[in-house]
């Protein structure tokens, strides 16, 4: 039987990138460059798409590699960062027109804070259950 990661390490490997990504993105986009956009082939790519491209393969790796390894550790960190990107924009994309100015509105910020907070609570509960 493989030796699984301790729950606290798993929690931290997801939580730290989740918080760093969320806080870093929001600070950069609110304070430094609110009009920075990523365009690929003429299409504006919002960060939940990049987040999904990180989180989905990472979740698959985590599901099938339960033992501690560099691949699993990297996948846990990618899962945290990707999840932060997706959660950050759910309320923004549902409740606003999707413009850069709308991203800076309180509904976008507080919606993201609530969703990130709920994710953190879920992670903590899962860690406690597994400990």
Image: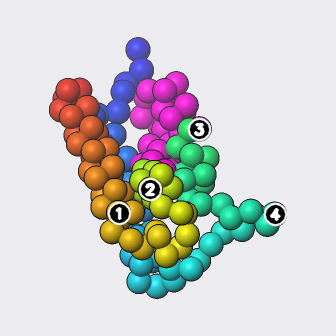
Evaluate if marks 3 and 2 touch, with contact meaning CB atoms under 8 Å apart: no
Image point (41%, 83%), residue name: 31
**Element marked by disc 3:** helix
On residue 107, the disc is 1
Up/down of 2 relative to 10, above or below: above
Residue 58: x %, y % from top left: 53, 39
Left or right placement of residue 33 versus residue 49 in this view: left
On residue 99, the disc is none
- The answer to whether residue 4 is seen in the rendering is yes
Within 10 Å of disc 4 (Cα), the crowding (few <14, some 14-19, many 20+) is few
Quadrant for the N terminus, please: top left
Question: What residue is shown with label 2?
Answer: 95
Label 4 vs label 1, nearer the camera: 1
Label 4 vs label 3, nearer the camera: 4
What is the C-alpha distance between the residues marked 1 and 3?
30 Å
Up/down of 124 relative to 106, above or below: above
Looking at the image, tell me whether mark 4 or mark 3 is earlier in sequence order: 4
What is the C-alpha distance between the residues marked 4 and 1?
30 Å
Residue 13: x %, y % from top left: 36, 48
Label 1 vs label 3, nearer the camera: 1
Q: Quadrant of residue 99?
A: bottom right
Q: Quadrant of residue 41?
A: bottom right
**Element marked by disc 2:** helix
Evaluate if marks 2 and 1 touch, with contact meaning CB atoms under 8 Å apart: yes
Query: How does the figure colour the protein chain or chains?
Result: rainbow
- The answer to whether residue 89 is seen in the rendering is no
Question: What residue is shown with label 3?
Answer: 57
The stretch in magenta equals 57-86
> Mainly helix, strand or loop, the magenta region?
helix
Image point (33%, 52%), residue name: 116
On residue 41, the disc is 4
């Amino acid at each position: 039987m493989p030796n699984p990661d301790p729950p606290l390490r798993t929690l931290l490997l997801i939580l730290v990138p989740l918080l760093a990504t969320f806080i870093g993105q929001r600070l950069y986009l609110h304070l430094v460059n609110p009009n920075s956009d990523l365009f690929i082939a003429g299409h504006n790519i919002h960060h939940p798409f990049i987040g999904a491209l990180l989180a989905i393969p990472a979740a698959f790796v985590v599901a099938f590699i339960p033992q501690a390894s560099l691949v699993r550790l990297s996948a846990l960190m990618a899962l945290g960062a990707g999840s932060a990107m997706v959660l950050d924009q759910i309320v923004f994309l549902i409740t606003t027109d999707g413009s850069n100015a709308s991203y800076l509105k309180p509904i976008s910020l507080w919606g993201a804070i609530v969703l990130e907070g709920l994710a953190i609570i879920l992670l903590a509960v899962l860690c406690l259950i597994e400990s």
